[in-house]
């Protein structure tokens, strides 16, 4: 949802706190579930991730989640799906070149990131999306690979 | 100038010769040599034709002879269809020019781009410019599928990886990887400016060797941007070539201001154009003056001229500006 998404980057600091607190819990829970059910619940979990992140961030389920490095603005909502900063076409009012009625995702990302404690994460280079993860749950993948949500 | 035939008698294709390897240089092309030598470089944009006639490419390039160090071949600029940049560069390279191959992420995925880079290397193309690309919606094929598999920073990373690790993204080895001098663009005028510096820093950290900017008409704004760039030490890591352009009339200026996002034209320029008897001439005069002013800015290594549909005036403008001093860039006439 567009409004929820703008809210997220405007309150990026609070979201960061919640995110950092809940993500280890989510991941360890998923690890346990995965051990017990051997992946049988993957589909409902993916579905819940899609509903939750879809509502909060307009998540597009790219399967390569980088929200906390992009000021809590999902870069997949950029019409060009840019993951490392804006294109040269941002309008004078900060809106998108392609969709003039929408705030440029990266203008949101930058202002979100400036509010966050880890405000340098946005400067890390994110190599292009691994498209083979598209539509899959980033949470399950991270849980299985024993990694943290970034 | 007589244009040499591509098919010589033995029907072999001889791409332009590479320069000998040189310590501290990435590529074996002339453009990098000019920059590292500390000379003020001039680059110009060539508009690839809507035709299969290669002479149209040669004729346009010949307009720059003796005044331009490297020629940018645009890649579907404005999301409009034209001759491909790889092929334009191949033609230019054959003559001996130093082409800069623009790659836009809009039309090709990582498989196609890596293939093109190898092909470009085989044709002695030594410079590439990594761009995000204008959106399909602004061009003449708005119904096309956007690719954007990579973004410009991922593309810079990819070209560096191929060059330095000698392998494709997959890890598969490349014998003789292309030794590309990598450039990218930045628009210093898009708000917010502070973040633009961050974006520039990220691009340079990804491995950009040179930067060509979007049109700069507002010199105080450019100066401000460049001084921040110098303060961050970025001009030590990459060469900067601010972009200048010609405005054919007040009407064009107004159109650009309203339709091309991120181009900032100050009122003083509008006033000058309005007051001029010959607006086109005045536009060229302004462009030559902008070049002079660009040269004075600290941290600048050259200038990039985008004179769309006025390519024939580029040489005169460079001459009038005097930015080259008494240096004469390489031209094929000297050779043939
Ligand atoms: S203006 Fe912003 S949101 Fe729109 S395409 Fe460019 S980077 Fe993406």
Image: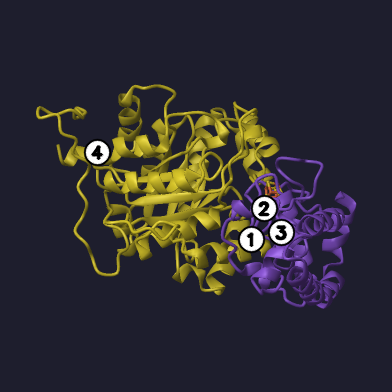
Q: Mark 3 lies on which chain?
A: B
How far apart marks 2 and 1 lie (CA) works out to 7 Å
Q: Could you say which is closer to the camera, residue B269 or residue B81?
A: B81
Lateral position of residue B276 relative to residue A43, left or right: left
- The verdict on label 3 being within 8 Å of ligand 1 is no
How far apart marks 1 and 3 lie (CA) works out to 7 Å
Q: Residue at x 64, y 29 (%)?
A: B142
How far apart marks 1 and 4 lie (CA) works out to 37 Å
Residue B51 visible in the snapshot? yes
Label 2 sits on a secondary structure element that is loop
Question: Which chain wears yellow?
Answer: B
Quarter of the image that includes the C terminus of chain A: bottom right
- Residue B186, quarter of picture: bottom right
- The verdict on label 4 being within 8 Å of ligand 1 is no
Q: What number is the disc on residue B192?
A: 3
Q: Which chain carries label 1?
A: B
Label 3 sits on a secondary structure element that is loop
Q: Residue at x 44, y 58 (%)?
A: B210
Q: Residue under circle 2?
A: B190
Q: Which chain carries label 2?
A: B
Disc 2 with disc 3 on a shared chain: yes
Label 1 sits on a secondary structure element that is helix
How far apart marks 2 and 3 lie (CA) works out to 6 Å
Q: Residue under circle 1?
A: B196
Q: Position of residue B188 (x, y in %)?
A: 61, 56
Q: How crowded is mark 3: few (under 14 residues within 10 Å), some or many (20 or more)?
A: some
- The verdict on label 2 being within 8 Å of ligand 1 is no
Q: Residue at x 54, y 45 (%)?
A: B105
User: Which of the marked residues, 1 or 4, is nearer the chain's N terminus?
Assistant: 4
Q: Mark 4 lies on which chain?
A: B
The hue in which chain A appears in the rendered picture of the protein: purple
């Amino acid at each position: 949802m567009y409004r929820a998404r703008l809210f997220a980057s405007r309150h990026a600091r609070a979201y960061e706190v919640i995110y950092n607190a809940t993500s280890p819990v989510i991941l360890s829970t998923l690890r346990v579930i995965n051990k017990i059910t051997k992946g049988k619940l993957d589909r409902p979990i993916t579905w819940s991730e899609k509903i939750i992140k879809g509502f909060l961030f307009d998540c597009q389920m790219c399967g390569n989640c980088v929200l906390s490095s992009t000021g809590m603005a999902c870069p997949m909502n950029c019409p060009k799906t840019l993951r490392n900063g804006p294109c040269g076409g941002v309008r004078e009012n900060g809106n998108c070149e392609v969709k003039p009625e929408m705030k440029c995702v990266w203008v949101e990302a930058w202002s979100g990131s400036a509010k966050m404690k880890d405000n340098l994460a946005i400067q890390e280079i994110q190599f292009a999306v691994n498209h083979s993860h598209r539509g899959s749950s980033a949470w399950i993948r991270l849980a299985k690979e024993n990694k943290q949500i970034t | 100038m007589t244009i040499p035939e591509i098919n010589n008698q033995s029907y072999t294709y001889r791409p332009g010769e590479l320069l000998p390897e040189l310590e501290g240089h990435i590529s074996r092309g002339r453009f990098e040599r000019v920059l590292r030598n500390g000379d003020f470089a001039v680059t110009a944009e060539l508009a690839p034709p809507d035709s299969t006639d290669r002479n149209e490419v040669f004729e346009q390039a010949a307009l720059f002879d003796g005044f331009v160090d490297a020629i940018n071949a645009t890649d579907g600029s404005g999301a409009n269809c034209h001759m491909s940049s790889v092929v334009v560069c191949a033609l230019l390279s054959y003559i001996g020019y130093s082409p800069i191959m623009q790659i836009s992420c809009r039309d090709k995925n990582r498989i196609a781009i890596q293939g093109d880079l190898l092909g470009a290397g085989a044709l002695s193309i030594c410079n590439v410019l990594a761009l995000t690309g204008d959106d399909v919606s602004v061009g003449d094929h708005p119904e096309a599928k956007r690719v954007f598999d990579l973004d410009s920073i991922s593309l810079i990373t990819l070209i560096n990886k191929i060059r330095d690790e000698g392998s494709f993204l997959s890890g598969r080895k490349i014998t003789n990887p292309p030794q590309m001098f990598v450039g990218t663009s930045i628009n210093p005028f898009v708000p917010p400016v502070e973040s633009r510096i961050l974006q520039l820093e990220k691009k340079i950290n990804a491995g950009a060797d040179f930067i060509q900017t979007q049109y700069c008409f507002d010199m105080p704004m450019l100066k401000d941007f460049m001084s921040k760039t110098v303060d961050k030490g970025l001009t030590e890591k990459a060469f900067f070539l601010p972009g200048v352009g010609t405005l054919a009339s007040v009407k064009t200026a107004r159109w650009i201001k309203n339709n091309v996002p991120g181009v900032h034209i100050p009122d003083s320029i509008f006033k000058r154009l309005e007051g001029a008897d010959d607006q086109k001439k005045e536009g060229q005069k302004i462009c030559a003056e902008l070049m002079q002013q660009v040269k004075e800015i600290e941290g600048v290594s050259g200038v990039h001229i985008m004179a769309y549909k006025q390519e024939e005036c580029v040489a005169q403008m460079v001459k009038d500006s005097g930015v080259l001093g008494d240096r004469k860039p390489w031209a094929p006439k000297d050779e043939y």
